[in-house]
Amino acid sequence: MTNQKLEGRVALITGAGSGTGAATARLMATEGASVVITGIPDDRVAVAAKITASGGSAIAIPTDVSDPAQVEGGAVIIIASVTALTGTMANVTYSTGKAGLINLNLARDTAVHYGDQGIRANSICPDARFSRFTLCCM
């Protein structure tokens, strides 16, 4: 691990068993964060093991984010998609769902609702990345 911009910080990432979530977990570990990979699929365990084998700090914890008792605050970063802004012929359902994260103001509403509890919320719109999902839809 070379950079340490996030040393002393903990990054809790849901959906990090594959794709963008896994890449985010690896990057945050490279930057020095202790990574907690949460979610239901078992892929999260393999990602945590790879991070640890590379010299990073990571654990995998089974978590159902739809259960409020299993979720705590901090900074919420909602991963939308550039397709939410541009549209796509390949998978209209996907881009429509991601647009809902932006156009229905999920990040803003979350920030307003939970801001007094010290929870920040933002959304980002990364470009397409090759993954099992994108390859099946091309």
Image (tube, grey):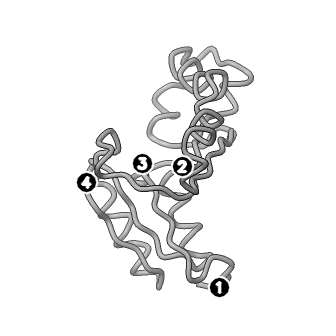
Decide if residue 97 is on the left or right side of residue 88.
left
Q: Residue type at mark 3: give it.
A: Gly
Query: Which residue lies under the disc numbered 1?
Result: 2
Q: Residue type at mark 1: give it.
A: Thr
Do the residues bearing badges 2 and 3 touch, measured as CB atoms within 8 Å?
A: yes
Do the residues bearing badges 3 and 1 touch, measured as CB atoms within 8 Å?
A: no
Return the x and y of residue 23 as percentages of the image width and height.
Answer: 54, 58
Helix, strand or loop status at disc 4: loop
Q: Residue type at mark 2: give it.
A: Thr
Query: Which residue lies under the disc numbered 4?
Result: 42
Crowd rating for badge 2 (residues with CA inside 10 Å; few <14, some 14–19, many 20+): some
Do the residues bearing badges 1 and 4 touch, measured as CB atoms within 8 Å?
A: no
Query: Which residue lies under the disc numbered 2?
Result: 20
Mark pair 2, 1: CA separation:
21 Å
Return the x and y of residue 17 as percentages of the image width and height.
Answer: 38, 53
| Residue nearest the observer in this picture, 14 or 21 | 14
Crowd rating for badge 4 (residues with CA inside 10 Å; few <14, some 14–19, many 20+): few
Q: Residue type at mark 4: give it.
A: Asp
